[in-house]
Amino acid sequence: VELKSQMAELEDGGVFRTYGVQNFLEGDFFRWYLDAWEEDVTEAVRLLATRLSEFEPTTPILRSGEARDLLKKLYQYLVPRKLRHDLGEYYTPDWIAERLLNQLGYDGNPDVRLLDPACGSGTFLTLAIDRAREFMAARFLDRDPLKRKECAKKILRNVVGFDLNPLAVIAARTNYLLAFGDFLRDVRPIEMPVYICDSVLTPVLQKKAQQKRLSLFDKAQDTDFFFLPTSAGEFLMPKAVLDKGVLGQVTAMIESCVEAGY
């Protein structure tokens, strides 16, 4: 019972929130085993914990590149190749990602916004963060605590990933966190800017006066709320929530209310 409760807290993200990461795990897709908890599940979880304890915990910090490669391989083992290809997912080697970033002229400037709309396990995101570190080091920005903190906030705001596959999002968040590394001490708590969403199906703005719908990418004036089309129907989200940057807090509050039965 104690192990099950600990795993439930882990799936809800409680452990990660303790360390300042608000949305690393959100417990929506992969906690099914808690509902099927029996002795064989207990043994499987204990065995997994034992195997994980054999890994050197400082490796992701000292050799982040190797840790990133390990997660890529793990993701490929968990998702069959045919399924990945049917979903349009293809493994992206680092050298291809580096070449594309070069072609884009991305030098790691934290003020430049970079969005990967189908981020997979986060290859482009982690390489972008690596470049941001190099950009800061070349200008000695990492030696000034205030400038370092400001740059860390800009990375979180400007290096963003979307993906439809929830397993890919977990892998990308893990890689993002490994690349972000010691920046976490400067800006915690944080919300990981890697989201489960459809980058093609965008929210729609509703104009209050003319009742005219605008695309998310159109210029909006006097707008009231967003229409969010989902498989369960359309939802409304006040534009002010997005403007103030509190969407994560609002959705967390909604989730808490649902869990409490309100």
Image: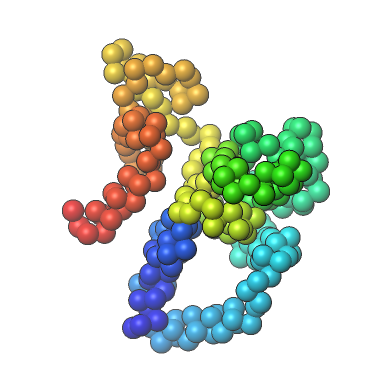
Residue 97 shows in this picture: no
Q: Is residue 136 left or right of residue 251?
A: right
**Above-or-below relation of 188 to 107:** below
Which residue is at 47% across, 32% downward?
202
Q: Which of 136 and 226 lies nearest the eye of the viewer?
A: 136
Q: Residue 248 location, x and y as percent?
A: 39, 46
Residue found at x 62% / y 74%: 57
| Residue 128 coordinates in the image, percent (x, y) | 68, 44
- Looking at the rendered image, the quarter that the N terminus falls into is bottom left
Return the residue found at the far left.
Answer: 262
Q: Residue at left 60%, top 42%?
A: 147
Q: Is residue 253 above or below residue 109?
A: below
Q: For the point 47% across and 63% down, which residue is it? A: 19
State whether residue 174 is above or below residue 49. Answer: above
Q: Is residue 60 visible?
A: yes
Expressed as whole percent of the image width and height from the top left, the position of residue 69 reads 72, 62
Tally the numbered discs.
Answer: 0
- Tell me, what colour scheme is on the image? rainbow
The quadrant in which residue 109 appears is top right
Q: Is residue 19 left or right of residue 50?
A: left
Q: Is residue 33 left or right of residue 60?
A: left
129 or 41, which lies in front? 129
Residue 158 placement (x, y as % from top left): 58, 38
Taking 138 as reference, is 53 above or below it?
below
Query: Where, by quadrant of the figure, is residue 38 drawn?
Result: bottom left
